[in-house]
Image (cartoon, helix red, strand yellow):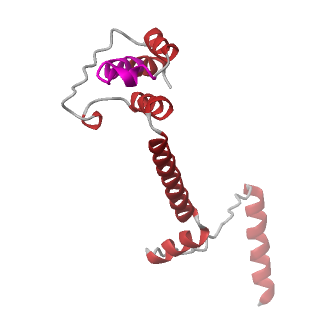
């Protein structure tokens, strides 16, 4: 992760925290807020529009993650925490099942057969050509000449 990306995310989180309820903001430890202020890039231009949801705005994934962590750790009720934990477990299980299905050897071979990929094996011949020396060629020609004469 780049430092600039982290600094920009800290600034985004500070801007978003300006719009949450005071009682929820007080639940977040002051040390956490100070860390955000220390690392925030105050030159970064980011405006949060309360009329839009966080998904509709240009908020970085890192900032969304920080906000989600603060909500889970400090603001959420025990019932909300349990729902979040169950959702995370469900999502993790789904991802693991998808990976298992994608990389299962039997499925890989089935997919190959379904796509009707024809693999042709071709025999390749390696032909060695040796370049004979001039005197070897001459000797072989003379030898052939005498062998032909002797057959008659």
Instruction: Say which of 108 and 138 sits in front.
Output: 108
Horizontal arrangement in the rendering, residue 105 relative to residue 115 (left or right) = right
Where's residue 17, x and y in %?
Answer: 35, 21
As drawn, 1 above or below 151: above
Q: Which residue is drawn at 39% across and 25% down?
A: 24
Q: Give the range drawn in magenta.
A: 10-27
As drawn, 26 above or below 103: above
Where's residue 35, x and y in %?
Answer: 50, 13
Where's residue 13, x and y in %?
Answer: 38, 22
Q: Which residue is drawn at 47% across and 35% down?
A: 72
Query: What is the quadrant of the C terminus in the image?
Result: bottom right
Instruction: Say which of 20 and 40 sits in front.
Output: 20
Question: How many numbered circles does the render carry?
Answer: 0
Q: Quadrant of residue 50?
A: top left
Where's residue 61, x and y in %?
Answer: 40, 33
Examine the structure image and report whether residue 139 is included in the region drawn in magenta.
no
As drawn, 133 above or below 49: below
As drawn, 59 above or below 22: below
Horizontal arrangement in the rendering, residue 74 relative to residue 145 (left or right) = left
């Amino acid at each position: 992760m780049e430092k600039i990306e982290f600094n920009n995310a800290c600034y985004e989180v500070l801007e978003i925290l300006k719009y949450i309820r005071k009682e929820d903001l007080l639940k977040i430890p002051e040390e956490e807020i100070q860390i955000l202020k220390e690392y925030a890039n105050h030159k970064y231009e980011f405006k949060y529009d309360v009329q839009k949801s966080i998904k509709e705005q240009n908020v970085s994934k890192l900032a969304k993650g920080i906000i989600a962590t603060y909500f889970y750790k400090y603001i959420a009720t025990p019932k909300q925490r349990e729902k979040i934990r169950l959702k995370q477990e469900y999502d993790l299980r789904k991802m693991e099942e998808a990976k298992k299905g994608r990389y299962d050897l039997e499925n890989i071979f089935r997919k190959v057969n379904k796509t009707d990929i024809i693999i042709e094996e071709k025999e390749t011949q390696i032909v060695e050509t040796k370049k004979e020396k001039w005197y070897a060629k001459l000797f072989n020609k003379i030898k052939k000449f005498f062998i032909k004469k002797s057959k008659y």
